[in-house]
Image (spheres, rainbow, N blue to C red):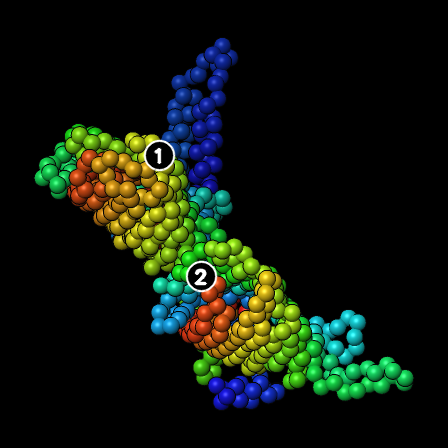
């Protein structure tokens, strides 16, 4: 994994010869670069959880926007939005996850600093970009566990990015996160709150042509029930995508993903591990 | 020639003048003799060509005569009268470089080779006169007049159609159509009466539309039934743009274009009455829409082999409910020769009936499979309207009839079909001696 990350890192070095246009023999041009953060995702995969294979379907809308800050000089926003992300799988452990919205809003400044306003204003160098992670309406339904569901109504993370890239192709954002969730089971619905007692990691790296993409997210920390009780939970996801070919300029990618959960899976707060491998197509994913 | 004509004209004019009887004086016998002598000398003058007159006696074309080309200007030409062409009216197409004109009588000829009163049919009109003085400078060759594409003209100047578009016609036919039921080992003796209006027209570049109106088959005899469709429409296309562009990135990025010729097929109001022994069932398709994918089609899109699939909304009139019938078919329609005489049809279609209510004596989701192969050949044409021989083989498996055993029925059908309209095909060649 480290070697892969290094390879990806090296491949993102500026390449003045990079061309995002190919040409057919008849002179028509076609795109050869893609944006892993943009498009309509349609995918299927083989999902293996605790030895049980299942077919997984995945869909969602990805939008990535790069813009200059309207109020701050020499400042850029790299915003990644994920809408209506849905994964459903069959097999013996039939289940569904749905995320209404998930976004990472990262602000890059060329020279970060902290203003000390006591006495003579002084700027202290601040070697981080700041980022805001948002998630809303994340539903988890596990049919095989019986009736019930888990709904994270909202989550917000205030993150720092020490890598400070000025592109959308790489980021490393770490920081505290707060969330509220509802857990509905046979015994009723309980509220669960994590008041910035969790640490959130969101990192990703992509090649400049967008044909390789690595993304990892993690969350670890404590959550508290309204009626008392604390739970430690941790979760990590890592996914690698590689564009195999393009059909009508829509990239078709191989996606390998792994997920590990500690004390956070379903209503029973299980420990789980999942692997998946599949194909996905991303219409409108041209860079 | 000119002198003779003027002299003859004067004589005729004089001959037409009526003199009042009362005004006519008595003609003495000497005067009478003098007049007869003048008339005789005039007739002698008319009979003997004047110096420089054109005494050409143009022969009529024969079976081996060349044919006038369809291109180029056609000119009217007046030649000296001949026993075969007393009117002296000819049509000429001249080749300046060869100093040659292919000339043909302006009227059709009778079996003895004499011109009739019928002007040549389906020829380009001549609007310019080729003067005899100019024509004298050319070598005049008797020829057969041109004919439009798909038509043939014989040496007598008559045209007959030898190329037929059976996708544009009004057809009426009949056939002997016995049916065998596999389950009961029985045979139904039936005849088929069929009718339909077929239309076909090219659309935008690379698209061909086809429509059939009132396609009806009525089976009479044992187990009378019918099958009728009010409207059937489809179009095929030849896409210049690839349907899929596949880009590969290993090595130098390359784009591979995948072409697929998609089309559309639909039916509106298709009624079918099915009879098997004592069981009768009525089905009415309200609408059916299929997407088509041509596996092969001819350059003119007329012949094809394709697959199509799509949903149908059907009313089970016997049991009184609506059903959804998805179906798929592999079918072909081939015109085997360029003159449109030989046609082959084949098809296999599978249907599954969904959303049906429970009916005693049949499965909840019945199925149908229809097979068909047919051949139609034009045997003759009456007044340019083709009469064709039709041969059909059909097989149907179905279990959608309540209280009737599921199984195959087979039918072999042979008959004749008369077609009205049936113009020449759009790709009809211009006739040559071998009829195109």
Closer to the camera, B338 or A80?
Answer: A80
* Residue under the point 32% across and 51% down: B328
Q: In this view, does B421 lie to the left or right of A235?
A: left
**Residue B394 showing in the rendered view:** no
In the picture, the disc for residue B321 is: 1
Q: Quadrant of the C terminus of chain A?
A: bottom right
Closer to the camera, A42 or B210?
Answer: A42
User: For mark 1, does the 10 Å Cα neighbourhood hold few (<14), some (14 to 19), or many (20 or more) residues?
Assistant: few
Percent across and percent down for residue A229 are: 57, 67
Which residue appears farthest toward the top when viewing the image?
Answer: B22
Q: Is residue B282 left or right of residue B181?
A: right
* Residue under the point 40% across and 52% down: B291
Which residue appears farthest toward the front when viewing the image?
Answer: A228
* Residue under the point 33% across and 55% down: B306
Percent across and percent down for residue A223 are: 58, 69
Q: Is residue B428 left or right of residue B393?
A: right
Closer to the camera, B56 or A239?
Answer: A239
Distance of label 2 from label 1 (alpha carbons):
39 Å
Q: SS of the residue at dot 2? A: strand
Percent across and percent down for residue A128 are: 70, 83
In the picture, the disc for residue A142 is: 2
């Amino acid at each position: 994994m480290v070697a892969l990350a290094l390879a990806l890192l090296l491949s993102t070095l500026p390449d003045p010869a990079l061309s995002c246009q190919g040409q057919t023999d008849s002179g028509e041009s076609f795109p050869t670069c893609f944006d892993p953060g943009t498009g309509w995702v349609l995918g299927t995969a083989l999902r293996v959880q605790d030895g049980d294979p299942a077919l997984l379907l995945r869909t969602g809308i990805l939008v990535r926007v790069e813009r200059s800050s309207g109020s701050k000089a020499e400042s850029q926003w790299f915003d990644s939005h994920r809408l209506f992300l849905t994964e459903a799988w069959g097999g013996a452990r039939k289940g569904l996850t749905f995320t209404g919205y998930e976004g990472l809003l990262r602000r890059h400044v060329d020279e970060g600093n902290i203003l000390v306003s006591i006495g003579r204003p002084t700027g202290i160098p601040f070697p981080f970009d700041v980022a805001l992670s948002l998630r809303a309406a994340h539903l988890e339904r596990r049919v095989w566990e019986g009736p019930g569901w888990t709904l994270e109504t909202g989550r917000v993370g205030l993150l720092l990015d020490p890598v400070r890239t000025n592109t959308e192709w790489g980021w490393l954002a770490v920081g505290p996160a707060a969330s509220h969730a509802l857990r509905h089971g046979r015994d009723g619905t309980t509220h669960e709150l994590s008041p910035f007692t969790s640490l959130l990691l969101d990192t990703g790296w992509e090649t400049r042509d967008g044909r390789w993409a690595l993304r990892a997210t993690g969350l670890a920390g404590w959550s508290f029930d309204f009626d008392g009780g604390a739970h430690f939970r941790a979760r990590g996801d890592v996914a690698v995508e590689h564009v195999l070919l393009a059909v009508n300029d829509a990239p078709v990618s191989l996606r390998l993903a792994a997920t590990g959960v500690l004390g956070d899976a379903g209503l029973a707060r299980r420990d789980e591990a999942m692997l998946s491998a599949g194909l996905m197509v991303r219409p409108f994913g041209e860079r | 020639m000119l002198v003779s004509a003027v002299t003859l004209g004067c004589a005729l004019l004089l001959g037409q003048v009526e003199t009042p009887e009362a005004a006519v004086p008595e003609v003495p016998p000497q005067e009478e003799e003098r007049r007869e002598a003048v008339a005789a000398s005039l007739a002698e003058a008319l009979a003997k060509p004047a110096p420089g007159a054109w005494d050409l006696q143009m022969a009529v074309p024969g079976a081996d005569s060349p044919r006038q080309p369809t291109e180029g200007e056609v000119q009217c030409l007046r030649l000296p009268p001949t026993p075969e062409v007393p009117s002296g009216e000819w049509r000429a197409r001249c080749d300046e470089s060869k100093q040659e004109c292919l000339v043909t009588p302006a009227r059709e000829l009778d079996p003895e080779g004499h011109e009739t009163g019928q002007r040549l049919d389906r020829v380009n009109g001549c609007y310019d006169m080729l003067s005899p003085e100019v024509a004298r400078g050319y070598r005049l060759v008797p020829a057969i007049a041109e004919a439009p594409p798909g038509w043939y003209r014989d040496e007598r100047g008559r045209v007959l159609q030898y190329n037929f578009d059976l996708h544009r016609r009004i057809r009426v036919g009949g056939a002997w159509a016995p049916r065998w039921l596999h389950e009961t080992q029985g045979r139904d003796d039936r005849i088929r009466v069929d009718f339909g209006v077929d239309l076909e027209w090219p659309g935008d570049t690379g698209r061909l539309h086809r429509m059939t109106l009132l396609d009806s088959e009525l089976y009479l005899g044992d187990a009378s039934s019918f099958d009728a469709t009010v409207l059937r429409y489809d179009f095929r296309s030849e896409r210049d743009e690839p349907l899929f562009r596949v880009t590969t990135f290993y090595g130098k990025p390359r784009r591979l274009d995948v072409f697929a010729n998609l089309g559309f097929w639909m039916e509106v109001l298709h009624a079918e009455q099915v009879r098997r022994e004592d069981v009768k069932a009525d089905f009415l398709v309200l609408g059916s829409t299929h997407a088509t994918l041509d596996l092969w089609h001819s350059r003119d899109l007329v012949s094809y082999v394709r697959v199509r699939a799509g949903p149908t909304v059907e009313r089970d009139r016997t049991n009184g409910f609506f059903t959804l019938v998805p179906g798929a078919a592999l079918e072909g329609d081939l015109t085997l020769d360029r003159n449109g005489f030989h046609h082959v049809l084949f098809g296999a279609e599978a249907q599954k009936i969904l959303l049906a209510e429970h009916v005693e004596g049949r499965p909840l989701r019945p199925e149908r499979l229809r097979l068909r192969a047919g051949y139609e050949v034009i045997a003759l044409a009456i007044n340019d309207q083709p009469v064709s021989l039709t041969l059909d083989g059909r097989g149907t498996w179905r279990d959608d009839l309540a209280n009737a055993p599921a199984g195959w029925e087979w039918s072999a059908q042979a008959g004749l079909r008369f077609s009205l309209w049936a113009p020449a095909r759009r790709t009809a060649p211009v006739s040559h001696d071998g009829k195109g």
